[in-house]
Amino acid sequence: MPRSVKVYWIFLFLIFIIYVIFGYFYFKNTYANGDEVHFLVATHSIVYDHDVWLENNYDQKVNLTFNPGAVDKIVAKGLDGHLYPVHGIGYSLLLAPFYALGNRLGTIIFSALLLSAIFILTCMFSNKITKNVKFSLILSLMMFLSHPLFNFSALNFTDAVGALVFILAIYNLLYTKKHYLLVTLILSFLPWIHIRYFLVALILYLYSVFKTSKRQKKLMLVFPLSIVCYFLFLKSTFGSYNPYTPYMIFGDTAFYGHFFWNLLSLFIDRQFGLLVYSPLFLYIVPGTYFWYIKNKKSFFTVLFIAVAYLIPIVIIDVRQGYAPPARLFITLLPLFIPSLVFFFMEMKNVVYKIIATGFFLWSVLNMTIALLLPPNHGFVYGDGVAPSLLYLSMHIGINIQELFPSFYHDMEITSIHYILIILIFIFWGFIFFDYSRNQRISENK
């Protein structure tokens, strides 16, 4: 076994232990929040009732065992009169074995395992692209031990599953080029987890079919069969092939926001934005340019998948006009670790490393504050609230939350949005100016 692989496995074990310890404290101090509650209710029904009919679970107040304040029902009434989960049933099926073993704590262990697997794949993926073991490991650790990835080691959302499948499939297509059937089986399950993964799953499947041998092509029919079953399930249960029918039955309306501002909210929104929770992502944009220069094939592959994933998210949203939260970008974030690696391979100025360390420590502080807050304060969720900014505002007497607007919550663009955009572009402009200057100096030597 190569030395680099041994190192990865050692860190895999260590990061899993950290996740489990953190998950236990999170479990003891914080209630399930938002859609977590409804995923857990559906999982409870699968484990104990062996069905996905949720009316008796809400009658028995199962939802209140996960969060005493979660009184709402996120359900859609089927043609048979039963109440079904609005979200796909696939994720609850994945949680079921772990829930059977340890209820909510068991599902947190599942999340820790899941994110640990994504971590090792990210290290391997980044190393393959950049040929830099050291930076791939260090920067992967920095991202996976801070917001926004760290908190998904304890949260029950579908985003981490999407991240695992995306990076596993792309790694196989670019480098392993062997396990097409396994990848196809995994991709066939994605739409059952959430419909937003369908387009990317379809693209990756078609590419796998193109690459696989003739002998295996018949076995790869499992993907179209799974999709047919998925749409037949929708038709027989809700009376429509439209995958958004459950949301509309629940009462959500079509999205009416603006494409650009929805895309922007993924990054600078106070409530969920990467700028607040993980400012290290600011290095990704210039790093992506360096990636393009160094390894065009992998760059365009990841870019194509990223666009295919993001466009449906920022165009279609069924939450009564709300913009998509930045946690949806978590699915893509591991794929962009090579951008960070290329950035620090090209930009050797110690100032960038000091700033990156500050960004990392801020992200760790975010989690520390959230963990120490009273139960259910809003570890990730909160109505237009960033827990760390709120906590700091209370203690310094200045409402620094106002420096970071929330389009997701307030549904309006303010002058602060424009100021932040300008500052971000100035930051990127300085980096590219410094890069150009370094290139000229190198050429003149």
Image (cartoon, grey):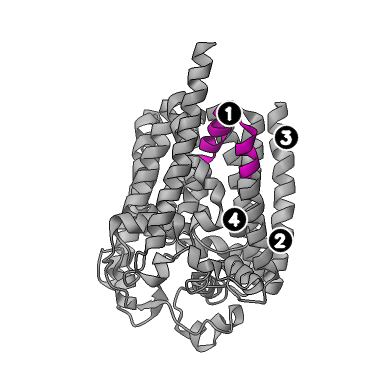
The residue depicted at 67 percent of the width and 59 percent of the height is 365
Q: Nearer the viewer, mark 4 or mark 3?
A: 4
Relative height, residue 19 to residue 28 (above, below)? above
Marks 4/3: CA–CA distance: 24 Å
Work out how far the residue at label 2 is from the one at label 4, CA to CA, in angstroms: 13 Å
Kindly identify which residue carries mark 4: 147
Residue linked to disc 2: 22
In the depicted view, which residue is nearer to us: 277 or 121? Answer: 277
Query: What amino acid does circle 4 point to?
Result: His
Which circle's residue, 2 or 4, is located before the other in the chain? 2
The answer to whether residue 355 is magenta is yes
Callout in the foreground (1, 2):
1
**Residue at x 58% of width, y 66% of height:** 389
Residue pictured at 50% horizontal, 12% vertical = 444
* Residue at position x 31%, y 69% in the image: 321
User: Are discs 4 and 3 less than 8 Å apart at CB?
Assistant: no
Provide residue 150's location: percent of width, then percent of height.
62, 55
Circle 4 packing at 10 Å, graded few (<14), some (14-19), many (20+), is many
Instruction: Mark 1: give few (<14), some (14-19) or many (20+) Cα within 10 Å.
Output: some
The residue beneath circle 1 is 345
| Secondary element at tag 2 | helix
Q: Which residues are magenta?
A: 336-356
Q: Amino acid at mark 3?
A: Val
Tell me which numbered mark, 1 or 4, is placed earlier along the sequence.
Answer: 4
Residue 350 located within the stretch drawn in magenta = yes
Quadrant hosting residue 323: bottom left
